[in-house]
Image: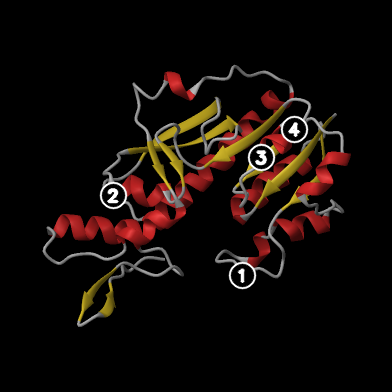
């Protein structure tokens, strides 16, 4: 039985942790996640901390890991960047589920920028974690076509669905060490490389009415994701928000 540490948040983290708990070949020693008191934009029932509590799994801090013996770290939408000393703790690997294709879209807000960049294909990736941002060797990936008029919320939902599938399909392969890592450096020339930081999305929220209708509509599709601030135009220094009829 492989011993693992799980780090994660959001419904995708909840669903992946559930699959680990249900796997009879895995023992989850502990969970690292956001505190229950922190505000979230997703449904409360999908809190990773609640699932851990319901299954008597300790909620840990990074400092707790030094005293534990475990085989893998699994990270799914964890909110902290891990340092080398943490990545070196598991017997085998620290593995991240990145909800975007790699090396195409590293970093944050990849759904928004994929729409802005007029992508017709997207994806999700399981990769080994290193000290870079989403730059470690790829273990498994799933790519899929997306509609030319997709809205960011729908792209998020679709990617979440495909990400859970990818995780469940390959978790046994991973714990049995049945994988062949592929360096992202070998893929950059044949694919593409984008990297966005969390702050970058705020630089594109203000739209310009001189743009073409297609561009304005594309940016609204890419940026309208309740409950976050919508895209806007400015009139007399006031923000006028642009929204879509989307749920």
Residue pictured at 31% horizontal, 70% vertical: 243
Q: Pointer 1: residues within 10 angstroms few (<14), some, or many (20+)?
A: few
Q: Residue 240, relative to residue 129: is it above or below?
A: below
In the rendered image, which residue does mark 1 sit on? 39
- Closer to us: 111 or 105: 105
Q: Are marks 4 and 3 in contact (CB under 8 Å)?
A: no
CB atoms of marks 3 and 1 within 8 Å? no
Alpha carbons under labels 3 and 1: distance apart = 26 Å
Instruction: Decide which of tag 3 and tag 2 comes sooner along the chain.
Output: 3
> What residue do we see at 60% from left, 32% from top?
130
Q: Residue 199: x, y in percent?
A: 43, 57
The quarter of the rendered structure image containing the N terminus is top right
Whichever of labels 4 and 3 marks the residue nearer the N terminus, that label is 4
How far apart marks 4 and 2 lie (CA) works out to: 36 Å
Quadrant in the picture for residue 89: top right
Q: Which residue is mark 2?
A: 116
Quadrant in the picture for residue 97: top right
The disc, 1 or 2, on the residue closer to the chain's N-terminal end is 1
Mark 1 to mark 2 CA distance (whole Å): 28 Å
Per the image, the residue denoted by label 4 is: 72
Of labels 3 and 2, the one closer to you: 3
Determine the secondary structure under disc 4: strand
Horizontal arrangement in the rendering, residue 115 relative to residue 14 (left or right): left
């Amino acid at each position: 039985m492989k011993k693992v540490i799980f780090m994660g948040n959001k419904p995708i983290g909840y669903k992946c942790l559930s699959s680990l708990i249900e796997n009879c070949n895995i023992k989850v020693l502990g969970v690292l996640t956001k505190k229950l008191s922190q505000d979230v934009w997703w449904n409360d029932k999908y809190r990773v901390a609640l699932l851990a509590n319901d299954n008597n799994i300790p909620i840990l801090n990074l400092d707790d890991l030094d005293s534990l013996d475990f085989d893998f770290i699994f990270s799914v939408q964890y909110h902290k960047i891990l340092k080398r000393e943490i990545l070196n703790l598991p017997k085998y690997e620290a593995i991240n589920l990145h909800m975007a294709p790699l090396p195409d879209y590293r970093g944050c807000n990849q759904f928004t920028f994929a729409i802005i960049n007029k992508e017709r294909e997207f994806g999700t990736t399981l990769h080994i974690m290193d000290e870079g941002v989403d730059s470690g060797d790829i273990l498994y990936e799933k790519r899929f076509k997306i509609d030319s008029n997709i809205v960011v919320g729908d792209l998020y939902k679709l990617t979440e669905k495909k990400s859970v599938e990818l995780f469940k399909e390959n978790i046994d392969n991973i714990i049995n060490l049945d994988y062949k890592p592929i360096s992202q450096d070998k893929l950059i020339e044949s694919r593409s490389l984008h990297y966005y930081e969390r702050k970058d999305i705020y630089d594109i929220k203000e739209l310009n009415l001189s743009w073409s209708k297609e561009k304005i509509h594309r940016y609204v599709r890419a940026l309208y994701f309740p409950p976050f601030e919508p895209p806007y135009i400015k009139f007399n220094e006031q923000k006028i928000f642009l929204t879509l009829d989307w749920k």
